[in-house]
């Protein structure tokens, strides 16, 4: 009888230890937290599926992107790159239920070594990034994509957490530069002449960081002469995501690309880690500690 009790106690202790280890592991992968919001990578196929549902709500239902019949049936934004990317999430932990019900924002992250094994980057279909990568063979690149946040969560706090997650992830994997497509609404670049011209004249990537839209898809961003561009009005006309990249120290490639499937006009953002302004390094922490334990 005593042996049975002792054996039962050992089982309970082992079970409790497993629970503690599981809880500790889950807490360890949280990259940032502000009040009820936290950012971390997706932990399961169910969470990736939930992130794809958020993307569908934003890209298709809100921004009128085209959806395949299967995507429309499932109400999910899905493509072949999802299987090889890491999916950064922002979750509202005050929402009761399964974690996938808490997902309110997402970013898709693709490291260079994984992209090269799988056939390339998503951005490569729009921009000629091969020469850029070749000029920096000793550097490690990461592609950022599919960024979206549900309308009711488009606040400074959510954006800060997304960048906290990106920065912590980049540090963990020794990333030297980030890049990715950022979008203007609609498929007529001329409707964004002021903002596109401002980007072209002021923060276009040059020299070793130069990169351009693929020739067959290139649409000029040089739609107004420099003297006709009012910087204040141009800044107010920029989408918030592009404005945020600029504040960090990003550059843009030469030329825009019209993406009819997503109903957008895309530019390529290029952000070397060495370009990130000291102000933001100090804010987020050189070791990404700024929001790592905020409650």
Image (tube, rainbow, N blue to C red):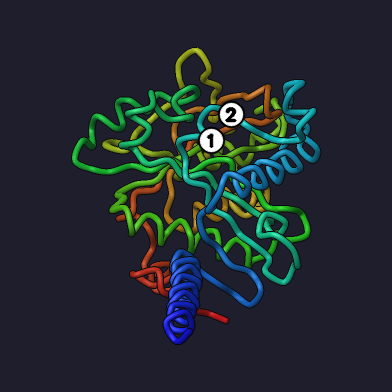
Q: From the viewer's perspective, tell me whether residue 148 is left or right of residue 108.
A: right
Give the residue at mark 1.
Answer: 82
What crowding class fits label 2: few (fewer than 14 Cα within 10 Å), some (14-19), or many (20 or more)?
Answer: few
The residue lying at 50 percent from left, 24 percent from top is 126
- Residue 6: x and y in percent read 43, 83
Marks 1 and 2 close (CB-CB < 8 Å)? yes
Residue 5 spot, x, y in % from top left: 48, 83
**Residue at 63% in and 77% down:** 35
* 107 sits to left or right of 274: right
Q: Position of residue 153 (x, y in %)?
A: 72, 61
> Secondary structure beneath disc 2?
loop
Query: From where the camera sits, is residue 290 visible?
Result: no
Looking at the picture, how far across and down is residue 133, in whole percent? Answer: 29, 32
Task: Pick whichever, 219 or 288, lies toward us.
Answer: 288
- Is residue 38 or residue 170 the one in the foreground? 38
The residue depicted at 53 percent of the width and 80 percent of the height is 294
Point 63% across, 24% down: residue: 259
- Name the side, left or right, on which 184 lies relative to 151: left
Numbered badge on residue 79: 2
Can you tell which quarter of the image residue 251 is in? top left
Residue reaching furthest to the front: 1
Disc 1 element = helix
Q: Residue lying farthest top?
A: 216
In the current view of this chain or complex, which residue is farthest to the left? 138
User: Neighbour class for label 1 at 10 Å: few (<14), some, many (≥20)?
Assistant: some
């Amino acid at each position: 009888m005593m042996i049975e009790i002792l054996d039962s106690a050992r089982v309970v202790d082992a079970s409790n230890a497993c629970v503690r280890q599981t809880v500790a592991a889950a807490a360890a992968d949280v990259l940032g937290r502000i009040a009820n919001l936290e950012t971390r990578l997706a932990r399961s196929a169910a969470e990736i599926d939930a992130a794809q549902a958020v993307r569908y709500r934003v890209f298709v239902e809100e921004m009128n992107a085209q959806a395949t019949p299967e995507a429309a049936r499932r109400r999910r934004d899905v493509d072949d790159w999802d299987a090889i990317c890491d999916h950064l999430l922002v979750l509202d932990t005050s929402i009761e239920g399964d974690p996938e019900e808490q997902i309110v924002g997402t970013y898709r992250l693709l490291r260079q070594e994984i992209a090269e094994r799988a056939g390339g980057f998503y951005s490569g279909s729009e921009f000629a990034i091969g020469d850029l990568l070749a000029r920096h063979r000793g550097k490690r690149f990461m592609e950022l994509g599919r960024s979206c946040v549900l309308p009711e969560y488009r606040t400074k706090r959510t954006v800060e957490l997304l960048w906290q997650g990106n920065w912590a992830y980049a540090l963990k994997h020794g990333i030297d530069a980030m890049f990715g497509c950022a979008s203007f609404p609609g498929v007529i670049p001329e409707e964004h002449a002021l903002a596109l011209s401002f980007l072209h004249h002021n923060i276009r990537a040059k020299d070793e960081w130069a990169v351009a839209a693929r020739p067959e898809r290139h649409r000029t961003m040089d739609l107004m002469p420099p003297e006709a561009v009012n910087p204040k009005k141009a800044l107010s006309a920029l989408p918030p995501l592009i404005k945020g990249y600029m504040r960090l120290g990003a550059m843009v490639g030469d030329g825009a690309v019209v993406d009819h499937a997503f109903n957008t006009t895309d530019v390529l953002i290029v952000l070397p880690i060495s370009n990130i302004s000291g102000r933001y390094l100090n804010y987020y922490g050189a070791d990404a500690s700024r929001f790592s334990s905020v409650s």
